[in-house]
Amino acid sequence: MALPAGAGASSQGLGSSASAMVPTSASASAVMEAGSLSSAGPTAEATTCRTEPAFGVLAPSGLNCLAATGDFRWVYTGGDDGVVRRYDFFASINGEQELPRTSPLQTVCNSSGVLLGTWLPWGSSQPPQVRALCAHSQGLWAVVGSSHGHVQLATIRVNEGTAYHSVQAHTDSVSDLTLLPGEFACLSASLDTTIALHDLNTGQCSTIQSGRSHPHGHKSQVTSINMQPHAAATTALSSSLDGTARLWDLRTTECRSLAVYLRSPGDRPPPLLTATWGIGGAQVYTAQADGRVVEWDLRQQGPVRSVLTPAPTGVTALCILHGQIVCGTAEGSVLVYAMDQNWEAKHPKYTLLRGERGTVSSIITDAEYRFLLVSSGTRGMAGQAANSCLGYDLTDLLKLPPSTLEQQLPLSQ
């Protein structure tokens, strides 16, 4: 997610510079400064290895979000045109449908995504944009977040697109959605600085963070929300343009702030465009507007290392694979860094995933880390959308992780 344009707290008038979006001060109990990381980041260097997309999808408008069923049989895109589209992933990755010869994606792939269905969550008369998606693991329903702050639960297996619940959860755009373990509830994050909890059985919505009024909450737009990857997890991770990543205990709705990476003492923290969990749930990765990705170890209560990507306007999407981290940038590059290399080296190597795309809005992978989907859209922020989604087969590129990754323990245990 690139930085919004304008000034103020609402997405209708967001500051164009990073400093305009970051509070000048923060509560000492909520923010821990971390000056131990080197401020002089390395200049990244690409390896000779490149991988081509297996298929591509070209949409009429920017694609802001992606979701998939647990087996990756169906994948969903949400776009600026207010439409949710469902694709047959395996028919697409197997090349069962060719791209039209006139398609701009012909320069990078030959196969097209196999479209199965579409629906308009909020009707056909000037619908709001679809900004966030999450899907039931067995494809029974999906939760959709809009640019107007709506959150809707809709069926997707029978009578596709039929709304069960729809609530005005926020006063500004929904920036992200995440399902809780058991798939009976979800969290929504918004550019109005709030985080809301939704009971998917009843449609009831309650606010976890009440914007700037929360004593330890985010003071600016919330850019991402993710549940810890553990079957009994009760901890959620959020990131914000105020430069903080925060951990929320959903049993008490209390939060504690992850240490904030600062360039030097006294500097304002750079805005965080997204954040995600490591595979075991003991590590967290945050993406800054200056292009730096920082790894945090929650057991050590601090930053471990960082890598400065060649993305001067920021890393907008992150995805963790076995032994690799995938970084999507505002410029449109998708870079894969090996976890076992020295990130503080002068020239940390990365693999470049080929593809003609604009600002990367979302990256998702399957449960076995064999495939990758990358969408291009702005999510209502500054940037340039390529209106595309590219699918990659990573079987020959990415190897299994070092055994140390399997020793990570979930935070909630």
Image (spheres, helix red, strand yellow):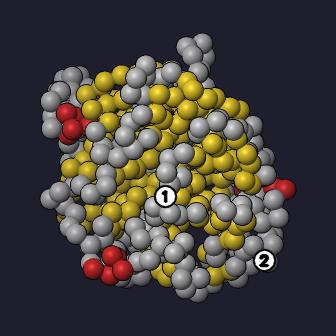
Q: Quadrant of residue 4?
A: top right
Q: Judge whether 123 appears above or below 364 on screen.
A: above
Residue position for label 1? 315
- How many numbered badges does the structure rendering display? 2
Residue position for label 2? 29
> At which x and y percent is residue 186?
58, 47
> At which x and y percent is residue 73?
28, 39
For the point 31% across and 24% down, the residue is: 116
Q: Judge whether 272 appears above or below 76 on screen.
A: below
For the point 44% across and 47% down, the residue is: 362
Q: Residues within 10 Å of mark 1 (few under 14, many from 20)?
A: many
Three-letter residue code for mark 1: Val
Q: 369 or 24: nearer the eye?
A: 369
Q: Is residue 22 left or right of residue 50?
A: right
Q: Residues within 10 Å of mark 2 (few under 14, many from 20)?
A: few
Q: Nearer the viewer, mark 2 or mark 1?
A: 2
> At which x and y percent is residue 34?
63, 82
Q: 249 or 212: nearer the eye?
A: 249
Q: Judge whether 322 appears above or below 301 on screen.
A: above
Q: Judge whether 34 appears above or below 326 on screen.
A: below
Q: Secondary structure at mark 1?
A: strand
Q: Secondary structure at mark 2?
A: loop
